Amino acid sequence: MNKLISTFFGVGLLKPAPGTWGSLAALPLFWIIYEMVGLIGVLLISAATFYFGLKAIENYSSKTQ
């Protein structure tokens, strides 16, 4: 599960330009969240996603070393 979260369900492994693919995959999610809960909701969900993403990356990288 940590690998799926760390790579945004594999999007971060696509070549070429994995960051670009990740940004493109995040745009529809941003739009849906914005339409549902507005800008404050987007900011809160983004902060929570950032925190849990960091924890997933930390767990994933510690197991692969």
Image (cartoon, rainbow, N blue to C red):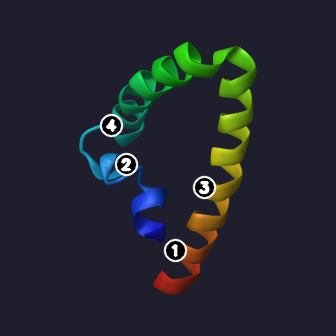
Q: Which of marks 1 and 3 is nearer the N terminus?
A: 3
On residue 60, which mark appears? 1
Residue at the spot x=56%, y=19% of the render? 36
Q: In this view, does 31 lie above or below 16?
A: above
Pointer 4 residue: 17
Q: Determine crowd level at label 2: few under 14, some 14-19, many 20+ residues with C-alpha closer than 10 A.
A: some
Residue at the spot x=44%, y=23% of the render? 27
Q: Which of marks 4 and 2 is in front?
A: 2
What residue type is disc 4 on?
Ala
Q: Which of marks 1 and 4 is in front?
A: 1
Q: Report how far apart the C-alphas of labels 4 and 2 lie in the structure.
A: 9 Å
What residue type is disc 1 on?
Tyr
Q: Report how far apart the C-alphas of labels 2 and 3 lie in the structure.
A: 13 Å
Where's the N terminus, which quadrant? bottom left
Disc 1 and disc 4 in contact, CB within 8 angstroms: no
Disc 4 secondary structure class:
loop
Do we see residue 10 in this rendering?
yes
Q: Quadrant of residue 54?
A: bottom right
What residue type is disc 2 on?
Gly
Pointer 3 residue: 53
Q: Report how far apart the C-alphas of labels 1 and 3 lie in the structure.
A: 10 Å
Disc 4 and disc 2 in contact, CB within 8 angstroms: no
Disc 3 secondary structure class:
helix
Residue 45, image x and y in percent?
66, 37
Q: Determine crowd level at label 3: few under 14, some 14-19, many 20+ residues with C-alpha closer than 10 A.
A: some
Residue 55, image x and y in percent?
66, 65
